[in-house]
Each structure stands twice: as C-alpha cells, then as structure tokens.
Image (cartoon, rainbow, N blue to C red):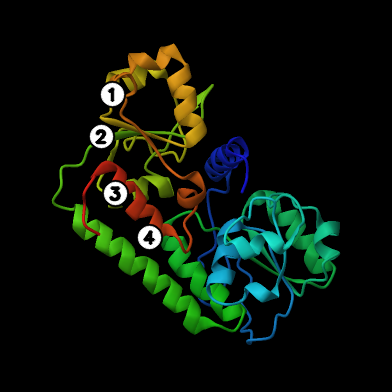
Amino acid sequence: MYPAARSLRSFALCIALVACGEAHRAASVAGVDDFGTPVRAGTATSPARIASLNPATTELLFAIGAGPRVVARTAWDMWPVAARAVTDVGPGLRPNVEAVLAQHPDLVVLYASAENRLAAQQLRAAGVYVLAFRIDRLADFSRDARALGRAVGDSANAALAVDSVERTLARVRAATRSLPAPTVFWHVWDSPIYTIGRGSYLDELLTIAGGKNIYGDRADVSPQVSLEDIVRRDPQFILAGADGARAIAANPLWRGVRAAREGRVLVVDTNLVGRPSVRAGEAAISIARLLHPGIVL
C-alpha cells in the first residue's frame, strides 16, 4: 500500500485536477469515448496488451476479468492487489509516452483531460489504439464502464459490474432515506483548506450515505474554504483521511470547529472512496456506517 501521506496527496490531487479539467466533454456512449474516438469492439483475447493509465479503469479491467491483459499502470493504481504486479509507468496525467510504448500495448486507456490530449496524439502516431474516459461521477462510471467492456470484448461482465454498483448504491440510498442527515465537512487538504462541492463524486457519495455536505451550495468540485467559514457553518461531523484527521488533531486552530473540539472527526479510507469505480457501492456503505452507526445494510 501507499504510505498514508502519498495516498492522501494523490486523493487531493485527483480532486483538484477534476476542478481544473475541461469544461466540456464529448458525449460518451457505447460507441464513443470521451474524446470522441470510436470504440472498436474487442474480443476475449484482443486487445492483448492493455496500458491502463487511470486507477478507475484499472480497477474496472481487473473486475471484469481483463486484468491478465493489463501490462502497464500508473503509480497510483493500487487496487486490486494483483494490479501492483503490473509495470508502473509513472503518472497518469501527461504520461511518459516512451515508458508506455516500451510495454508494447495495443490499447492505451487514458484519463480524458486536456493534459492528456498530446499523449493521445503521440501514442496514436506510434500506431497504438487509444481510448480516453473521464470517470468523475457515478453516471460517468456506469456509461464508460460499458464502453470499456465493449472495447475489451467483455460487455457482459462490464454490465454486471455496473449493475452490482448501482444495486448497492440503491440499497444504501434506501436505508438512509428516512434517517436524519447530519451536516458534514469533508476535509480534503490542509494549508490551504480544500473540501468538496456539489460537483464532486464525493458529494454524490455523501448524499447517498445519508449525509449533508455543508458546502453543497458550492458548484465547484473542490472549493478552497476558510477555517472561519467552517466554524460559521458548524458541521456536526468532519470526514477526513487518516493524515487529515491527525493534522486536525495537531492544530489547535481546528478546536474552533465544534466537531473537531468534541471529537466528531470520522476517518475515511481514501483509497476506497477516492474514485467512482467498481468499489463505489462499498465506499457508500463505509460512509453510511460512519454517519449512522448500527445501520443495517
């Protein structure tokens, strides 16, 4: 596993990059990726060598049985455990094209952001088939998972993965619907302080789990906020990663926030909740249990 600090940094970086990404995207349907590239139907053996440069798609490929064909991943792809045996080719944003090509992939799956358009062009110029998926929200996962399943020749398993996630999320939503929704501040980063707005997947997850984001009135994905404003909004709970919780406990200024002062800081597994992929249902369950101890799910 990553050391906790690296995990939290990557988690916060992913949130910030989403906020800075492209404002518009191509409509992704079964036949088109998020850059507008046609999705060719694959088979159970072709593409044979896949470089997945997005943790969400790496998780999905392993979940649908295409893991043995994954020959390259990013430094942040740590689930499932089997993914760690795959060659690490570095970052997923502005990737090292030479390192990727050294693994001789016949399909490269990128995160569909402006930072990766040049890499996509360079890889295509080298004769490699490239698909880009921008999986930032739950709807993105459901849509793009089916497209990726088609590309690797396993639409059936991709559909099963989507259905499993959607059923679990529906179960959590039903279990929390009638419960009082506690107000929550989600601590993403310190110095400066970043949190989640309503444009974030984490806001979706928190709502499904029966919580109310105190910055749900902010449209941006990861707004920067002040400690004074958090005090004013007075959340009932703070959600934070392990490092974030320690930072809050160590900084006397946070004692101005009643939830911190009274020990209502709940620690989330940032590796589990950090992306909308095949473990989104499990992530929603984990948050629901933190906010509603004793809930039956």
**Taking the image as drawn, is residue 160 in sight?**
yes
Which amino acid does the dot numbered 2 rest on? Thr
Label 1: which residue? Answer: 233
Q: Is residue 284 left or right of residue 45?
A: left
Which label's residue is closer to the chain start, 1 or 4? 1
**Amino acid beneath label 3:** Ala
The alpha-carbon separation of the residues under discs 1 and 4 comes to 29 Å
Residue 146 vertical placement versus 115 (above, below) = below
State how far apart marks 4 and 2 are (Cα). 21 Å
Residue 15 in the image, given as x and y percentages of width and height: 52, 42
Give the mark nearest the N terminus, 3 or 4. 4
* Residue sitting at x 85%, y 68%: 126
The residue indicated by pointer 2 is 183
The quadrant in which the C terminus is found is bottom left
Asked whether the beta carbons under mark 2 and mark 1 sit within 8 Å of each other, the answer is yes
Q: Position of residue 25 (x, y in %)?
A: 54, 57
The mark nearer the N terminus, 3 or 2, is 2
Residue 145 in the image: state x and y as whole percent: 50, 70
Image height check: is 46 above or below 250?
Answer: below
Q: Are marks 3 and 4 in contact (CB under 8 Å)?
A: no
Q: Amino acid at mark 4?
A: Gly
- Which residue position holds label 4? 281
Can the viewer see residue 31 in this picture? no
Quadrant in the rendering for residue 88: bottom right
- Judged from the image, the secondary structure of the residue bearing numbered disc 2 is strand
Q: Disc 3 or disc 2, which is closer to the eye?
A: 3
Asked whether the residues under the numbered discs 1 and 4 touch, taking CB atoms below 8 Å apart as contact, a structural biologist would say no
Q: Secondary structure at mark 3?
A: helix
Q: Which of the two discs, 2 and 1, sits closer to the camera?
A: 2
Using residue 73 as the reference point, say whether residue 214 is left or right of it: left
Residue picked out by circle 3: 288
- 84 lies left or right of 220: right
